[in-house]
Amino acid sequence: MTRSSLYLGKIAGIKLYVHWTFLLLIVWVVLSSYRNGFNEDSTLYSVLLVLTAFVCVTLHEFGHALTAKHFHYITNDITLLPIGGIARMDELPDKPKQELAVALAGPLVNVVIALVLLPFVLWKGLPDTNAVTIIGGNMDDYLGGIFYINISLAIFNLIPAFPMDGGRVFRALLSFFMNRVKATTVASRTGQSISILFIVVGLFGNPVLAIIGVVIFLLAKAENELVKSVSLLEGFTVSDVLMRKYHTLNEDDSINDAVKVLLDVQAFDFLVMRGDTVVGTLNREAITDAVADRKLETPVKEIMNRDFIVLNRAIPLDKLFNGFRRKAYGILPVVEENKVVGVVDMNNLLELVMVTKGRAEYHMKQNAA
């Protein structure tokens, strides 16, 4: 269990978590049922409906993840939240056909579930949509409730509010006719416009819709800026941002030794070495946390980060950027002929983005003059 999520297990190599706030949803369902006059059948229906709905959400996210896996994109984990699920991928597909397939896979799963349920629902009699509610329903409405939930999930997720599934479908279609940066800008602005509508409607009726609108607005803006930043790194490689001055610690050095180095140099991240080989990385936060835990004599190898990759000069920076952002690498070694020749960190990449952006703006002003 992490600080915020409970680990449920691994399916198809993908870790599944549920956020602690999901428990609040169950508590809210039970309390709401109690306020409406506690009824065992009604409460069971409400809790079961919510749990089954989140199974459907999980299958929706696995639809995305497994389709992405088909195109060799790795999904690290899926986290279930009260408002849905989040699949965290190392990298998102950038080819229009692949992005289109991955974006459509989730809603398609919900459509398939609804089609599987349809014969049973029709046999039992399709309930009135007004009768299918989370609170106050009964077990006779259960299959109808799951049917409507999956139809609703498919339709809602296909709204072209980037970065929702529908927004990604919209961007993928735009990318057939324009470059990815422009397609993202158009999809992002469209998504933000729709999110403002969500906020306005939500404020006068459904606060959850308003919250979703705010989240969509912020995520659309963030991803638009991200795509622009990555595009500015195209054509550059690791050799363009290689830092030859870096600081190291030996794996057997104590935390006390690391503190002395930390106070003596202007560095936030260190390579941890075993002879001439990099065996880990260590950042300032890990050192200060160890000090707070009174681990001054503990070897740095006990707290170092072992999740790192070794780079070479030819790696494209636009591909590396996503790795830094999603894996939160502090510093990465660049190795040639089994020897460390330098390092790269996220600040290197961001500085190059700013310089490249500044040069582009300068040339635009020169051309306009």
Image (spheres, grey):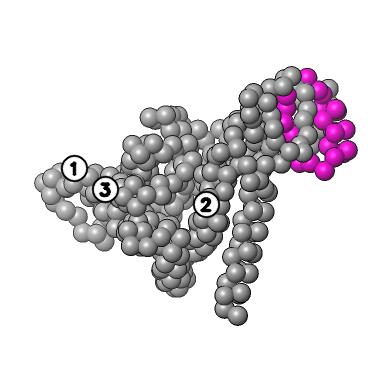
- Spot occupied by residue 168 in the image (x, y as percentages of width and height): 38, 56
Q: Which mark is residue 116?
A: 1
Q: Amino acid at mark 2?
A: Glu
The image quadrant where one finds the N terminus is top right
Decide if residue 90 is in sight here.
Answer: yes
Above/below status of 71 relative to 130: above
Alpha carbon distance from label 2 to label 3:
34 Å
Q: Secondary structure at mark 1?
A: helix
Q: Would residue 45 be found to the left or right of residue 213 on screen?
A: left
Q: Amino acid at mark 1?
A: Val
Q: Position of residue 341 (x, y in %)?
A: 69, 32
From the viewer's perspective, tell me whether residue 298 is left or right of residue 260: left
Based on the picture, tell me whether residue 365 belongs to the magenta stretch. no
Q: Residue 137 location, x and y as percent?
A: 30, 52
Give the SS element for disc 3.
helix
Q: Residue at x 43, y 37 (%)?
A: 74
Tell me: residue 201, above or below residue 8.
below
Whether residue 285 is visible to the viewer of this picture, yes or no, is no
Q: Which mark is residue 108?
A: 3
Q: Disc count in the image?
A: 3
Amino acid marked by disc 3 = Leu
Magenta stretch: give its range.
Answer: 252-273
| 272 falls in the magenta region | yes
The span from disc 3 to disc 1 (Cα, nearest Å) is 12 Å
**Separation of disc 1 and disc 2 at Cα?**
46 Å
Q: Disc 2 designates what residue?
A: 234
